[in-house]
């Protein structure tokens, strides 16, 4: 029997992405898989039902029927990443089924315990190892790329001036100054986008090893007199720092932020609150009309004044805390997600096999729940459970 893959319509409020696009459905069908898509699942992303049918998908209307017929359920958001209705979907699943989705395993781990009790195997795509072999499956990097790009566009739209230098008959307009805090995937994409739009761009990260990457996208790397010897943590992320370090860092950053027209903050640590990098006093030092885009808003924000999902005016500065920016470009976001998912599925079910390759290191790293147990050590720690027996 062919492996049966189901793609439900997303139910998280405002979510416009879809887990598979028609072209990737065709790739899976060629691999010998059977793909069922809930009618209307791709419409918001620009992929009509007819395209799915033309590429070999079977369409169904009933969500319960879709779940009941599947070996693997593939979603953009599930469990903790879909707090509104993730539990409803879990109730439709049975023991032995496999769920592949973004599940917010470190920020909202509770539903993973429910999935374990139900006997569902869960692959939380946020846990994909940050290794060379897993790059094609890295959902976080894919979506961070789009978030960094969109952040600059949001900022450019909110600024009372243009980004590039422009020489006109009415005189020369100086280029705007853009400062990006954090040189991960989102930060580097924000720097590159701001540079392409003509801004004078500066970037900062507590990890000095990323200096060459910042320079490579056309930005100037801001160096501060700080001890950053132990700044990099697991997976290439910045490590959580103590309050003394953060206080000194804020003092040194104040001058750079004060002269910037557009500030974009991207510093986030998985499973931890976002570090506070911009205080209210730092916002007060910014020029009236300046804009701050806080991409860490979902975890509390890098700016003290950020309100998740809102745009506010504080001391003459526009502060935005956007959520789910990739969903604002759902067509390309879905293309990237679908390619990530295809690479993951082909690795997990090798050479047309219908059984998971449990021994594979990427499969093991991404697995959050299996055989009635929460298997990931970091998720178990978040739930207050002892380390796994094999640890």
Image (tube, rainbow, N blue to C red):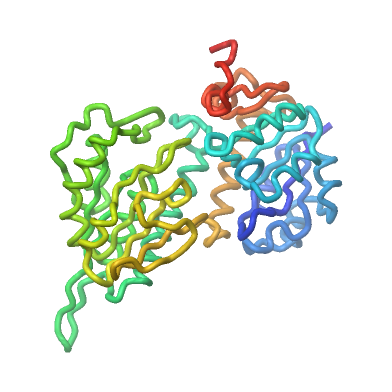
Question: Residue 326: where, in percent of width, then height?
Answer: 51, 55
Q: Which is more toward the observer, 297 or 62?
A: 297
Look at the picture and state if 190 lies above or below 182.
Answer: below
Taking the spot 17% from the left edge, 73% from the top edge, the residue there is 174
Q: Which is more toward the observer, 121 or 171?
A: 121
- The image quadrant where one finds the N terminus is top right
Taking the spot 64% from the left edge, 20% from the top edge, the residue there is 358
Name which quarter of the figure residue 259 lies in.
bottom left
Look at the picture and state if 256 lies above or below 341.
Answer: below
192 left or right, relative to 46? left
Question: Residue 123: where, in percent of width, then height?
Answer: 63, 32
Question: Residue 56: where, in percent of width, then height?
Answer: 77, 50
372 left or right, relative to 326? right
Question: Residue 307: where, in percent of width, then height?
Answer: 44, 58
26 left or right, relative to 300? right
Q: Which is more toward the observer, 204 or 334?
A: 204
Taking the spot 23% from the left edge, 41% from the top edge, the residue there is 247
57 left or right, relative to 302? right
């Amino acid at each position: 029997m062919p492996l049966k893959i189901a793609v439900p319509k997303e139910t998280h409020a405002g979510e416009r992405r879809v887990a598979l696009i028609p072209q990737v459905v065709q790739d899976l069908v060629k691999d010998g898989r059977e793909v069922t898509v809930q009618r209307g699942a791709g419409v918001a992303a620009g992929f009509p039902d007819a395209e799915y049918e033309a590429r070999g998908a079977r369409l169904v209307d009933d969500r319960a029927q879709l779940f009941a017929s599947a070996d693997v359920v593939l979603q953009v958001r599930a469990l903790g990443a879909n707090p509104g209705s993730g539990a409803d979907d879990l109730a439709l699943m049975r023991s032995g089924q496999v769920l592949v989705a973004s599940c917010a395993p470190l920020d909202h781990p509770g539903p993973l315990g429910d999935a374990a009790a139900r006997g569902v195997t869960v692959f939380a795509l946020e846990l994909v190892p940050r290794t060379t072999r897993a790059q094609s499956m890295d959902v976080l990097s894919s979506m961070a790329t789009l978030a960094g790009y969109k952040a600059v566009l949001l900022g450019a739209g909110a600024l009372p001036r243009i980004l590039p230098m422009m020489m006109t008959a009415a005189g020369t307009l100086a280029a705007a100054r853009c400062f990006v805090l954090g040189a991960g995937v989102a930060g580097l994409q924000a720097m590159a986008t701001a540079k392409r739009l003509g801004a004078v761009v500066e970037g900062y990260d507590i990890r000095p090893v990323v200096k060459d990457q910042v320079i490579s996208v056309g930005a100037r790397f801001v160096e501060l007199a700080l001890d950053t010897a132990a700044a990099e943590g697991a997976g290439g992320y910045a490590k959580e720092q103590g309050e003394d370090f953060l206080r000194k860092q804020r003092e040194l950053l104040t001058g750079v932020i004060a002269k910037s027209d557009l500030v974009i903050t991207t510093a986030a640590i998985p499973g931890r609150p976002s570090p506070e990098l911009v205080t209210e006093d730092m916002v007060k030092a910014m020029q009236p009309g300046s804009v701050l885009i806080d991409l860490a808003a979902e975890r509390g924000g890098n700016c003290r004044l950020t309100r998740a999902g809102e745009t506010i005016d504080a001391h003459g500065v526009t502060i935005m805390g956007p959520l789910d920016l990739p969903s604002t470009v759902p067509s390309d976001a879905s293309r990237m997600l679908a390619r990530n998912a295809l690479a993951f599925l082909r690795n997990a079910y090798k050479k047309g096999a219908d059984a998971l390759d449990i021994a594979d290191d990427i499969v093991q790293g991404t697995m959050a729940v299996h055989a009635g147990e929460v298997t990931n050590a970091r998720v178990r720690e978040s739930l207050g459970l002892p380390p796994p027996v094999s640890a």
